[in-house]
Amino acid sequence: MFSNGNRAIGQEELRLLRLEANQPIFPEDFADTISGSMALREDEKNLMAAYLRRPKSKRVNYTLNRIDSPMYPALAKVAEQEWRRVTEDKDSTRPMKRPRSERSAEDVKEDLVRDADIEIIRSQRELRTCLGNAFLSCCPTLRRRGSGRPQKMVAQLPDSLSENTMVLNSKRFTRVVLYAPGKGSPMKNAIICEADPSDLIAMREKNGNAYTGFRESKAKRGDSAPARDVIGYVTIGGFSLTRGSGIGNGVVSVNSLRRLVGKGAVIPNGRRKGVETGGIIVLFRNVSSLHYRPALIRVVP
């Protein structure tokens, strides 16, 4: 936003206001558009140039931190993992057929999801079409209040969608608002991970906010994948002055929301001391950190 060498003032303050108001921010929340993707790629080049200007002793080793894409939200890779998960589960439930042969490099390339294939759902009607009414009845959203009992609806989730819909949903993401009730604030390009049952048990034992998360071990040769499944990315984040805790915008896979709700990782919507509470329990980890922090996400549509 330059004109004749002049730059408009107040842009950073406007972004913070939109973050506090849970509004989308360009280009971070528009990675599925051509202009948004181009702007994010340009930001990636600038971040890489700044990274390379640092002395080697001052550079963060993202490989040791098990961060695959520290400067760009790799949604295509998340979509590919979701696609493989759906197809493998589908093949495991079918009757035995001829064994799957080794695929060639050309076949593998055809399966890879490109950035142009990513779709971010921004309306409740589209989300209802993708996931069904049963899911939205027990999924905390940003616009609906009240303390429901989602545990009663969990049993209806597994069989409510067809296999073809699950495959199509592997490339679909939805916008979420992320709240960090404990230590740590989500920052840009932080990974959003699926909480394991062991994480949920530890959170219950330590009464939620006292749970600080576990520490990721540094990567070894041949093993650089994170310990938790990546389901999305934080597009922009920081510290909220109105809530007194970390806050961020992000995108997560549509299919991962169903898995989290099926696990019972849901806190019903409510209100405490004038602040809305409730959401789906996830973990996030910043690109320069090894600590997984608990957080609650609420679907924006």
Image (cartoon, rainbow, N blue to C red):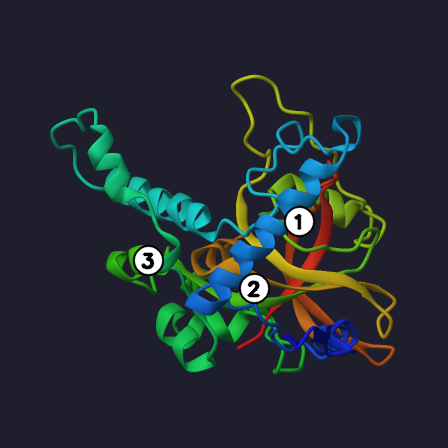
Mark 2: secondary structure: helix
The quadrant of the picture occupied by the N terminus is bottom right
Q: What amino acid is found at the position of numbered circle 1 in the picture?
A: Leu
What residue is shown with label 1?
Answer: 283
Q: In this view, does 31 lie above or below 232?
A: below
Query: Is 165 positioned to the left or the right of 48 in the image?
Result: left
Q: What amino acid is found at the position of numbered circle 2 in the picture?
A: Gln
Query: Is 85 positioned to the left or the right of 240 in the image?
Result: left
Q: Residue at x 11, y 28 (%)?
A: 98
The answer to the question of whether label 3 and label 2 lie on touching residues, with beta carbons closer than 8 A, is no
Image location of residue 29, percent across then percent down: 56, 67
Q: What amino acid is found at the position of numbered circle 3 in the picture?
A: Met
Distance from the alpha carbon under mark 2 to that under mark 1: 21 Å
**Residue 166's disc number:** 3
Distance from the alpha carbon under mark 3 to that under mark 2: 22 Å
Q: Which of disc 2 and disc 3 is earlier in sequence?
A: 2
Q: Which of 115 and 120 is in front in this view?
A: 115
What residue is shown with label 2?
Answer: 151
Other residues around mark 2 within 10 Å, as few (<14) / some (14–19) / many (≥20)? some
Q: In this view, does 30 lie above or below 51?
A: below
Image location of residue 167, percent across then percent down: 30, 55
Nearer mark to the viewer, of 2 and 1: 1
Q: Which of disc 3 and disc 1 is earlier in sequence?
A: 3
Q: Is residue 114 above or below residue 179?
A: above
Nearer mark to the viewer, of 3 and 2: 3
Q: Is residue 120 above or below residue 89?
A: below
Image location of residue 251, percent across then percent down: 55, 61
The answer to the question of whether label 2 and label 1 lie on touching residues, with beta carbons closer than 8 A, is no
Q: Residue at x 79, y 53 (%)?
A: 208
Can residue 264 be seen at all in this image of the molecule?
no
